Amino acid sequence: MAELKFPHSKEKLLPEQIQCVQPPHQSVDVTIVDKFKGSLLGLAVGDALGASVEFRPRQYLVDRPIANMQSGGTWGLQAGQWTDDTSMALCLASSLISRKGFDPYDQLVRYKWWYKHGYLSSTGRCFDIGNATHKSLDEFCRRQNECQRRLNSVSEEQMDKFSYEEMYRAKLDVNCGESNANGNGALMRLAPVPLFFYREPEKAVEYSGRSARLTHGDPRAVDACRYYGALIVAAIHGERKESLLDSNFCTKHRAWFGKNELHSEVLAVATGSFKKDGGYAMGIRGSGQIIKSLEAALWAFWSDQNSFKTGVLKAVNLGDDTDTTGAIYGQLAGAYYGSSQIPQEWMQQLYAKNFISCVAEWLQVLGDPRFLAQKSQHQVLENLHFTTQPLQQQLPTRISQTMGQQSDQYNNTRQNPLRVVTNPTHGQSIITSHSTAQNTTKYNMHTKPGPATHKTTSVTKNTEKHSSSWDWFRPQQ
């Protein structure tokens, strides 16, 4: 069947330039498709609405409330352009679609492409990257480079094409998030995971947590994604709003969460801490800290008077991390209301709206087991336990198949055992139980920097060392 092809990191294609290929026709409730589109488009709309006033304090927005898409502001974007929230969500979606399943190594590779080359960015460059994400991607690059040095003659491009299964055998730990990284950078990009796995809620919840751990190792960040993933799945399945916001939601869906209880601070939100009529006056904040972000998005959903427009503006006008609060709200509210309830004037302005809509449709189709590859990547982690061939024996064949080169070049890879060293202070193994991680974690805040001037300086410093193949998109300065 025809497939949606995502560009390689070195291809100079902006999201609006990527050809949209419609997925094969299948019998599906149009309401489900509308909800899929609503969740991904809702994320992007919330992001775009908040982009121009990111880091503005609450009082600034009391005096100058956001009511529509605006250009300029914090990042100098055009009205409707979006930031890191949507870029990373599209990277995650592109991995799920391209791999036809959950491949955490491939997800990190695509995040790295965004970080180094501006992959799937609305401007062709990486900007607005949070501290925790920045540190985790630097750590991933370090681990990948360490592995590359042990695989003689293997290029970074070849490394990027390997699968999680292969890197697992190479002992490359994909959990690159620091154990105290409790910002909102994982939650802001979450939607593609629960959308792809919505037919299997237990997997959707589990993989929502695992997707967070790649960049944010704090159990609060992991469990916030598990809980919010469950809410998105329930919304796709058509549960009523009262059920989604019920203080007993987790109890009623206990089977979805398995044996791992939610962190107490996440559970406090799930049982209703967001239900505050006074909003900001009662402590609701659009902060970059995960618990505050989760609470703010749910408060906006709870108080939106059954209107996406009302809710997303409430979220954005809380101030501070405006784009991410809007994006988190948009994921759930979009899944509940559907794309048809997002104001059309905003949809007309939204950058790459057709591409985002197309991506949502592919997530819906490929999440159906009938369209998965013969070797189910839903079960990739389970399959690892039955694989016995050492990585150093299979890599020459893999490289030869991938790059069209002769495997004889890689005899040293066969002969020399791999001893890839990972940093034990960064995260847990992918198969380490969540309860173990909880018992070894200290809780310190780690969020995006506050003032816009500080973050702009930081972004320039962080990205100037990368040679970007997207440079010709950058304005001359």
Image: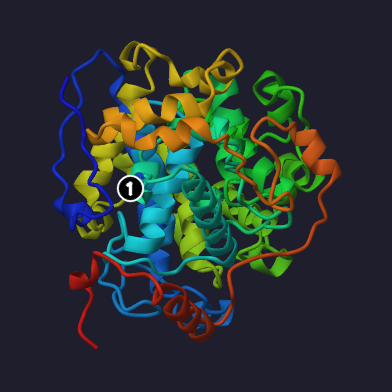
Residue sitting nearer the eye, 158 or 151? 151
Q: Position of residue 222 (x, y in %)?
A: 66, 43
Picture quarter containing residue 169? top right
Residue picked out by circle 1: 157
The one of 454 and 275 positioned closer to us in this rendering: 454
121 to the left or right of 449: left
In this rendering, does residue 225 appear at all?
Answer: yes
**Residue 34 visible to an observer of this rendering:** no
Quadrant where the N terminus sits is top left
Q: Tell me where residue 381 appears, x and y as whole percent.
A: 57, 23
Quick one: which residue is furthest to the right in this view?
A: 439
Q: At 54% across and 52% down in the image, what residue appears?
A: 146
What residue is rendered at 22% in x and 33% in y? 404
Task: Say if 258 sits above or below 184 in the image.
Answer: above
Q: Is residue 466 left or right of residue 461?
A: left
**Looking at the image, is 321 positioned above or below residue 252?**
below
How many circles with numbers are drawn on the protein?
1
Image-based side of 463 in relation to 347, left or right: right
In this view, the residue in front, 50 or 9, is 9
Q: Amino acid at mark 1?
A: Glu
Q: Horizontal and vertical percent for residue 171?
A: 60, 37
Q: Is residue 211 above or below residue 185?
A: above
Neighbour tally class for label 1: few under 14, some 14-19, many 20 plus, Cα within 10 Å: few
**Does 160 sit left or right of 131 as displayed?**
left
Q: Please report the residue visible at 31 percent of the width from the left and 23 percent of the height from the top.
A: 365
Residue 387, how many percent across, how many down?
55, 16
